[in-house]
Image (cartoon, helix red, strand yellow):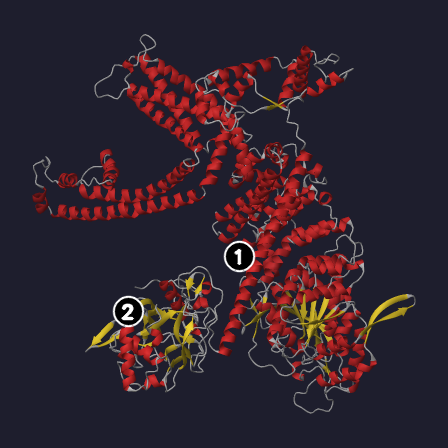
Amino acid sequence: TLQHYFIQSNLSSPRAYRVLVKLRLTSAPSMTSSTYARAIRGNHHDVERRPAKTWIEEHIKSRQCCVFVRTPPNQESTDPICGCGYVKSAHPPNTSEDNSKKWDYRQHTKLIDTNAFGRLNFVDEDGNQQPQFVKVSVDYEEPDKMKNIIKLFESRWCLPAPNLLISVTGGAKDFQVAPELLTEFKRGLIKAAKSTNAWVVTGGTNTGVMKLVGEAVRGHSASNVTTIGIASWGIIKNKQNLVRQNRRKDPGKQTLVFDYPTKADPESNEAYMDPNHSHFLLVDNGTQKKFGVEISMRGALEAAVCHHFQDSYDTQAADKCALPMICILVEGGPNSIATCLAAIRNGNPVLVLKGSGRSADIICQAYAMSNCVVTYEGHVETMQRMLPDEYKDEVMMEINKHFMPLKDDVKQGMYDSLLELMKFDNLLTVFELQGGSDFDNAILIAIIRSVSDNRAKMSQMMLAITWDRLMIAEKLILTRHSYDDQELEQLLRVAIIQNKTGFVKKLLDSNADMKHYLTYSELQSLYNTMDLKTQTFAKVMFTRAEASYGGVITLQLIGEFLEEVIEGSFRSPWTRSTFSYESICSTPVLCPYDVMVVFASIMEFHEMALLFWNKCKEPIVSGLIAAKINWFLSEFESNKLACDEDNAELLFKQGKEFELRSCGVLSTCYRKYERKEWTRILTAPRSLVNNMNLIELAKNIGADSFVAESAVQSYLNHTWMGEIHHTTSMKKILFCFVPPLFLLLRYNKRNMTSEEKQAWEYRQEQKMRKRGGIKSLVLTPSRSTLPVTAGADDAEDCRSLKPAPTRRKLHSREAFMAYYNSPATKFTLHFVTYFLFLILYGYTLLVPDKRQGYIFHNSNFTVIDIILFLWVCGQVPSEWHQLMKQIPMTLKEKVAVHFRDVFNVLDILGIATFYVAFLMKLIADRTDEIPVSGAFTLRNYYHLINVVAFMLLATRVIQVLEVSMNLGPKVIMIGKMMVDLCFFLFLMLIFLLTYGIASQALQAPNEEISGYRIYNVVLLPLLNIFGEIGLEDMQANLVEGHCTIPEGCGDDVNFRDFVDSERVVAVHYYVLQVFMFVYLILVNVLLLNLLIAIFSNTYETIESEASTIWKVQWCSVVTEFKQRQPLPNPFSLIYYVIMGFRWVVTKCQFSNKCLQQCAQKGKAAPDIDYYELYMLVSEAREVYFAKRDEDDDEADTRKNLKDIRDKLELVSQQVNQTSSLMRGPSVSLDRPDPAVNPLKHHDIHKDSRKSPYMGTGIERLLVADKNVPWEMSCPYNPPDYTDMDILKNTDKFAVDPPDPSAIIGRLNEEVDINGDKVDRTSFCGTYPVVDGVPLNPRGRTGLKGRGHLNRWGPNHTAEPIVTRWARDAQDNRLYMDGLPVMEFVGIFLRESKKWALPGGPIRHGEKLTAALRRELGEDALGSIGMEEAEMEHIKEMMHEHLALGIAVYRGYVDDPQNTDNAWVESHAINYHDSLGSSFSRFPLKTSEYGGEVLSVEWITLDRNLDLYGNHEWILEKVCFHRHAYNPFSTTAKKHLPVVS
């Protein structure tokens, strides 16, 4: 109301509004709005005349010079300078002048309201956060006034309470430190500040170490770090912009904002404020351009902050210690040593960064020279660090080196300060920044070393927990201090809240008692520490808490959440009406570790949940619950609008991990224990989950992998057969259902009770007595028989008595009950009778009533009708029985779970429709309805509904397939595909209705709306899908719909004539045909193929998990038929009548004590020793852990061995390459692989990216493997190089011109000009051309241009591969692993120092065979410069022997000459001398004119050869084709295609 009236009254002044609020707060409640208006209007001018002071103006003061002191006293100037540094004109008008004394701020200044406060807008900086600032008087270092500064921090600036104070001091000028060390310093500083919510205090200016801290805040996105800059007001550049007259209001905020420019260079005695600090205190003593004014104020402020906030961690201590503080020295000037000494005298640790320069290096040098000595003060022995006198000269030399201009007394003072500084060994820490060092660790260690007693042990431990430094805590804290139970519990709470699993484990190992710590109140308190930003379900929990529990997450709310997650019959004890939090809040929680597993899972502390799971009482149950919670949170995260898919997937995987752990423990129990023990573990009711057993729990939460475990399946198989032997087939069970045939089956034996054993012994003794063997035995059936007196014969007879057996066969009655109570028998009989029911039901539908025979006179009911009716009547209590056997407790939840099964829904619908049809038949029978020809009578309705009922009931037969392992998953597949089909039908319906409406609108635009027309809208397009086009009907509809004759158009109207006369009809007709074509294409082609793709995906998904799906189905079938009544329908009616009679008798006679005791005995819970059960599971968990650790160790060992093997292989290759280069070619044979692997090749070229470019000093641009393909977008500007000799060549047929557009022919084509062929096609296919320039099909090379290559694009080469079999001295072939060894003609290259195959470019107009012979002659036979006669001889030899060859490779060559725009492609042809009589006669030699080839030899294939380019691949291919030994198989890269 006040705000509305304020706006309506046009009182735009904020001061007026404050008066209005003040009146509202101080006036009587009955004061009306008009009274407020009069008060405002009457006081408005007073408000404007006397502006109200803000809190800062009232409590924060600054200083102003009030006495002008000329400095120097004799200066003559029109505007002289005062001792404060300001000119006289800058003083107030009434300032007095006194030159008799030296200027002193205590005498010549006065306190005034501060006129500089608000927010800063650094106009020349990006991403400015508008830090807050205030100008404050220097005398606020006094304790009384310092309280206002603390209040400013807390109340006005709303700074969070710190847990640590970091004071960074050092050089105020820029200094040089290695970039990697500065990066480590920034990272460690911000990490320490963010993890502990620390305040960082600096000098605040944009120079030196202050600038370094600001860059750290900006570079690590740490804008939430409180960084306070304390600087002198007088040295701030552009400070005149910060006074209150130069202000503007920030939109949306009631805060003064000052534009602060920082572009111009400051003077030597001025500095800008750093834009990356969050707050500034500008200390003023009335002076200008004087440094150091803030030093005393800064020290006092740091001490006051530490004293005020004290230790926020140590909440239990009566005498709290001060807030931890550390001073960090980086570089530093002459006053820095004194600053460090002052900090140490105040008991604060100092961390000095070695290598940062000047004062820091001096302190580090002195520290290194000092020694620890033992001193005695009275009887107290202390350890101090002392700097020996012999090192004084070295220290003074270091001081002189850095501070030469200083006076000697100042340098001596620095040395004296060093001597005193060294004495405080525990408070002084030297840290050297190195690559990979943890600076934040150094800060923590320095704080821990500063206090050695118990005063700060909690603070130190809390810092270690916050920074997650377990090793430091173990080494420096836990070993030096002891903690009582209360302290351990406090530390445990902090470690749990901060999700520090390592500390939780350590504290639990250090005797922290979880059972005593975890009370119900503490558990509820832990849940209320949820983080709304990071935890998935936190917001929902808080929303529910605000709606129901006043914003507090209570245990009742957690119980409701768990019931929602676990479902089923689970009922949390926290949601029951008997639960009272107030009465048990201080009571320890039962099973604390199990409860903490649930807590950690909800909080998404996965590692901590695993830790608690390792210690919980019920690992299988807790693991399954944790798995379900993670899956629930994953599903919740996936269903959010802003879905975090990564987090959802992570939660799902974490749930799977818990499920696998539970499966592992159960599997261990299955392997380790007997059937009786692991069955008891599976079936024992668990109190944690409302007495559900493990199988019920797993089914509830959907733990399919758990249900599919061998133990569960073995139990289900045993349960399925009951007491029938497991070897019995289903056929035998089916054929023995008529008594007494069931006695022919084989049954399991039962354990004998003690009474049965005594009876058996008694019968044995009776038999012996009849034979006269034992004459003096006490024969009583109630106890064991003991011989009274026995001779030798009696002793022999006693020995002949057999011991009582432990198991016995079933009696006839027991066999009868075992057979009919077996789930296998129930299943078999149920579906046999169900098939008979369907056969009879189908018979009634197919055969007329009059042919069936009526059971009553004048009635339509037959014997079959009565049987069907009784069968369905038996099905009703059977369905009710299944419903009540469902796991949930309430009827509503039972119904919900029961109807999740589609078959149950169909059963209910089938039964309901059957009764409706039966009732209609009964009514029709009583009314004697006379059928009318063509009328739809009640009997017709009865028959129609009967057919529907039959179809619904017949679907239950599909359940028979669930028993089959092959067909069971197909049932699930059908259900999934039905869902997919519904989605498809929805899409198809859109197209169908669109086309149907358009079609009817064009066919009959003048026809009235009717049911028949709507029917055609849906039916006709549907028939079109199945091939019923109906063109004639369409034409007839067009004629009828467009006819303008009142009496209509007859059937004899010709459509063509009608179209010719009606142009509108023609247009509609042809448009309809187009619409039909488009419709059929979309539906029959597009949508049907989409449906096929969807079905294929569903099939593949389910088929991959078929085994698990069937096992889950099998569990459901066994569970269902275990709970069913033993008799099938309709005989089940007898069973339900007997059970109902028993219930009535029991209720009527329950007052009888005997019956009551029997009933209680029958309902008593099974006698289960849960302690023994827990011990069995715990032992299995330990075995599971040991086995898993063993498997992990084995996997790690295999991985380490593989890594070592790979490294040794790499070293071996490098050594072999080096030795090959040192001693020339190697012809030794290494041990090869026994298998001949196919050739492999590189996807990404390597040699084509080698730098520098071959034969030049040009460096290629470095290209990472991932950026080689052209498809990858990355910054790429490589150098351009083409050989000058190539550029000078003007023969367009031999060498391409510099401009690609001027080449002969076109790229990607082969051209023939007067017999000169130029082939620009590539074996890699069509290569890309961008701006007329071809691009390398294998990607980037780091160099553009053509390099040494003649042509743009592919440069085709011919490579003749001449081979023969390697032979020994006796001319016998050499074999390795049963395969012949091969030799080839190789050339040793001068440039690359590698072996290569002969070869070179194919010239224009040259055939491939001619090029092969020429290259072989030039490279291997020295034909260049050869005499003509010898040359002719060589040509004849090559023509004779190089007639037949095998093409082994045609494609891209990874050549060092390749560039982005030109590359080499090879034709590799193999010529093999199998007999050693042809190529062996070739005179191998190099050319007399030198060149690239150094030598040419027959080279034995060896894996140690260092081959050029992809020649190793090509030789592998030759080995493959020649069935020769392949020494390169272990290093082959990728298979090359066979080229014929």
Q: At numbered mark 1, what does the secondary structure look like: helix, strand or loop?
A: helix
| Observer able to see residue 1279 | no
Query: Viewer-proximal residue, 113 or 1443?
Result: 1443
Residue plotted at (44% across, 59% down): 1235
Q: Nearer the viewer, residue 1244 or 30?
A: 1244
**As drawn, which residue projects farthest toward the front?**
1370
Left or right, 701 with respect to 1443, comes to right
Give how far across and how far down residue 469 sits, in percent. Answer: 68, 59
Q: Residue at x 55, y 33 (%)?
A: 715
Residue 564, quarter of picture: top right
Q: Position of residue 1037 (x, y in %)?
A: 16, 39
Most extreme residue toward the top, as rendered? 857
Quarter location, residue 569:
top right
The residue at which mark 1 appears reads as 7
Which residue is nearer to you in this view: 1052 or 1122? 1122
Q: Looking at the image, which residue is at 71% across and 36% down?
A: 583
- Label 1 environment density (alpha carbons within 10 Å; few <14, some 14–19, many ≥20): few
Q: Nearer the viewer, mark 1 or mark 2?
A: 2
Q: Position of residue 302 (x, y in %)?
A: 73, 67
- Which quadrant of the structure image shows residue 696? top right
Q: Residue at x 71, y 57 (%)?
A: 462
Horizontal side of 450 relative to 437 (left or right) equals right
Of the two numbered discs 1 and 2 on the same chain, state the one appearing first in sequence.
Answer: 1
Split into 4 quadrants, where in the image is the C terminus?
Answer: bottom left
Vertical order, 1008 against 413 (above or below): above
The residue wearing badge 2 is 1444
Q: Position of residue 612 (x, y in %)?
A: 65, 46
**Label 2 residue SS:** loop
The amino acid type found where label 1 is placed reads: Ile
Q: In whole angstroms, how far apart are the C-alphas of marks 1 and 2?
A: 104 Å
- Look at the image and tell me whether residue 308 can be seen: yes
Q: Which residue type carries mark 2?
A: Leu
